[in-house]
Image: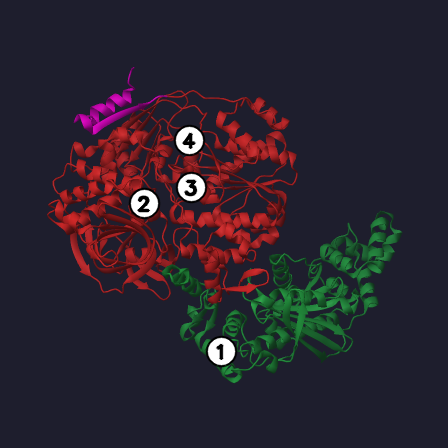
Amino acid sequence: MAGTAGGFRTARSLWRERLDPRHEYRVIEHDNRFRAGIGRTGIFASEFQRFEEEKERLCDLHAGSDLGEIIAGDIIDTPEGECFGIGESVSCPPLPLDPDAARAHLLRSLRLVPGIGPAHERRLKQKGCRTIRDLLHIRRYRPSAEETLSLITDGDAGAVMAWARSRLSPTHPEVIRSSALFDPGRLVFLDIETLGVFSRPVFLIGSATVEGGSVRLRQFLARDIDEELPALLAWQESLPDDPLILSYNGRCFDVPYLADRCAYYGEEYAFGAHQLDLLHITRRTLGRDLSDCRLATIEETVLGLKRGFDLPGALVPGWYDTYRRSKNPGPLIPIIRHNRQDVLSLVDLHRRYLEMYR
Amino acid sequence: MTQPPILTKIREECGTPEDALSIHRIFGREARYATIPDPLHPRLRSWLINEGIRPYIHQAEAYERASAGEDILLATQTASGKTLAFALPIIDRLLSDPDGRALLLYPTKALARDQLAAFQAIDRAIGAGLSPAVYDGDTPRDARPGIRSGSRIIISNMHEIHHILSWRRQWADFFSGTAFVVIDEAHRYRGVFGSHIALLMRRLTRVLAYYDASPVFILASATLGNPEEFAERLCGRRVRIIAEDGSPQSPKNIVFYNPYLRNPGASLTSEVSRLLAIHMRYRHQTICFSPSRRLAEVITRRTREELAGDPALADRLRAYRAGYLADERREIEAGLKSGVLQGVVSTNALELGVDIGTLDAVLMAGYPGATISFWQQAGRAGRSGDESLVTMVARYDPIDQYYMHHPDRFFAATAEHAAVDMRNPIILSGHLLCAAAEIPVGDGDITYFGDEMMAHLRELSDEGLLAWTRRGYVYAGARRPAEAVTLTGSASGGYRIMEKGRLIETMDAAQAYREAYPGAVLLHQDTSYIVRSVDRDDGVIRVDLLEADYFTRPLTTTSVSVDRILGSRSQSGLAISFAEVTVTEAITGYQLVRYDRIIGSEILDLPANSFPTQALILAIDPSLLEDHGIADPDGTLHAAEHALIAAMPGLVICDRNDIGGISTRYHPAVDGPAIIIYDGYTGGAGLAAKAYHLTGEIADLAATIVDECRCYDGCPACIFSPKCGNENKPLDKEGSAVLLHSLRKMNEGR
């Protein structure tokens, strides 16, 4: 009885209309850049049309097929149900992680010792104090220099990085160098795909570790919303102990987003203590020379990589929604590919910074 | 007893004929104090003693009940010390429970700032270290984390809570300690707004319960006809009503002035301005309440003209209304407190508890629409000990005129009922979407959202907006639901009114259809705008500034189809039902009106607008219209419809613009003559539902209004409706009296 009542019908279609993903961006008619305005993300009509055609093409191409048939992957079982796992090994040059060199660098940064600022450091260097060890001979610095020294030589890499962040700045080269102190197995490169910027499900978690000469990439996909929690759990399960999460804007977005989603389901989470956000570092080191700091721009200008078809982030929720409703895996393919490339680029970018600050 | 000189002057100026003026004296009341409650924390006790504060009986009762864990509603008058009544139980508990927190919700930011000062003062005085803070849209981003973690008393508003709940991870510490939720000015949360707030409170309690917090609710409201029912609807709990007011009250003279008995062509503005000038010349610090922003400005200007002979005095008058900048408002508030200002003309913005001290006199331009508003406004007058003066100048409309003719009934009347509806399917499903983005929603949540929850969840899930998971229904849409669901008024929202790219206001689709057709004149903050175009796809209404003194009135045809009967009863030739209906309105044209005179009309060709809502259906036996020698059955039904709509605000708090109606000789749903009165909001606002239970009383009031109006065949004080879509034709006053008398017998048939 209730189901057919006018009120229910109206209510559900009203919310359907008002919550449609296309409200999150604006299609700019006639590609008129003067109508782009500010505020909502805009996309030119001709581009939008191209993407719509591509979506249709993908849907036609994969009509009737099953996700497993076109994307190699496995079903992952968790106590909260299944999700879909995509794994891959990509060979790459090993990361130039040289903890001894990094330590030596850090020891030359006198400012890591409490009470020493930039001017002070200059004066001390003029006087011949080259490393923190030299400070042990100056009585007034001895206690704090001893403490800093033992942190750098024996402390946990996470503690050193946190120390460098707070003593210097979150984007200081020493922060990048301190990432070389981590056991390579603790480095996790992360990028996620979601239905929005906040309080909506995450449906794809791309995560990579580096093992010698290869990147071990894992993607955890929620084939429907009920697989979100399993994907979160499976991803957490895949993490090394006490990981360092490397991301592009992950400090503000990906990591708190995943924490919010875990909290939403009432699940514990134990990640995010150590992070290296490569966006912040890029803004500081390369930002001045670039038109913008989007990862795609960095790929082209810094990593010398040209992406082919790439789905704009604003369209991702709508494409996932199309997949969810139609169960046609077509629209998922570019999203998974996009996520994969993002994670791989993170590894390259980190390598680039390590080389830069070797 | 000697009469204050100003009263003599008013009598002189307005007292002929005899019945144009009626004066009602309310005797003062001594304060009734209680002893400081024994269990009160020693620091609070010594603070009270040091400050020389003796708690009133209602403050002590509030402390005792709230401390014992009872949810309470304080229904005491304006300026009765509600802040202390909140503060005692809260601070007492927070002093002894280091994890305890309190969330205080006020309807406006100004009021929140006011209350912050009060709580900070107590906190400082007793060194409690609770760091009271305001957390709202104006709180700087970088101050927010500190407030969340460090403040144990957070003062906020409903809109903020609506958005905060989905950030609950950041609020986990605060939420898990929440021991009190305070809702001040609770009577404001009624009608459509009330439906939203009631559901928001369910969401809040649900999130708090997730963190094992079960706070005590402390509500404060003006006197209502149905406080128990209202409070239970609003916050989902049975509350204890505390109405025994211990605060002192100064004697008051209440003057009802009906200028239309002196001169049928009287002007409200000039009468009020003249009276305000008299108040000021007699050195009575006065607040004049105006029904609209525009009128507030006009009255101010006219009064200044009246005072032209004394420019210094004219300078001490200000207008005050929403839309003024915060600094300007604060300056006026301070000017009133210090006595620099002698008069202020305000909209109901000052009806709220913003602290401006107490004044000598209150002047009302028209009945403020509800007895609770009347008494709230009247409460602004009354310096301790002194006799204060409250004057209401009537407008020429049914309720004003009714009370002018029956001041005794006004003073004997019980307060109106406040409607809060939990069934509006659009509002309910909207909040279910929000809730599902906060914590997965499962079967158990039926205790919060009612029996229709599961049906809604299934519908929303079929629509793809929710997804069923092992943890319950999870929000699966691509937009933030809290952004799509707006708490104010509109359930469907959606129209933005733009002037050259500048957003002026937003409107509900139904409201936009009715008011913002091409050519319509819209009024916003004293400024007229003319509607140029309506873009239904983008939801944009483009307007231009208009320099004109006319306004527009739409000509409409309305039809109602009945979807589902929810309840009915019948008696001697009448059947009354309450139903879900679909209203279809079509605007056929509009009239241009200047000074109540039609100066032109235009025809429009617009698509019709339909919306689902709730309605009261009166099915009338055709024989009833024949038997009593009714001359014009159409006019009878139409006039009775208008009178019922005019009378409704007398019993249910609403504005006549919140309700609409049709009358017809034949309606298929009842297979005969019918009068249908519906909520003018998409999904309904609970007004028709209330009217269904009060039909007899409403008909009784409507019959009295019609019987006693001295006009010959209808006038604005009885059966004319200012928003009639058919130019108030046809109307049969005598017939409507007959019909309404039959209806009034429908009392008590629930």
Q: Amino acid at mark 4?
A: Gln
Q: Which residue is mark 3?
A: B230
Q: Which residue is mark 2?
A: B691
Cα–Cα gap, marks 3 and 2: 15 Å
The chain letter under disc 1 is A
- Above or below residue B358? Residue B297 is below
Q: Which residue is mark 1?
A: A51
Cα–Cα gap, marks 2 and 4: 27 Å
Indicate left or right for B113 with B471 as reference. Answer: left
Measured from the top left, where is residue B562 in percent x and y?
A: 30, 58
Note whether residue A264 is visible: yes
Q: Which residue is mark 4?
A: B77
Assess whether mark 2 and mark 3 are in contact (beta carbons under 8 angstroms). no
Q: Colour of chain A?
A: green
Labels 1 and 4 within one chain: no
**Can residue B12 be found in the magenta stretch?**
yes
The chain letter under disc 2 is B
Quadrant of the image for the N terminus of chain B? top left
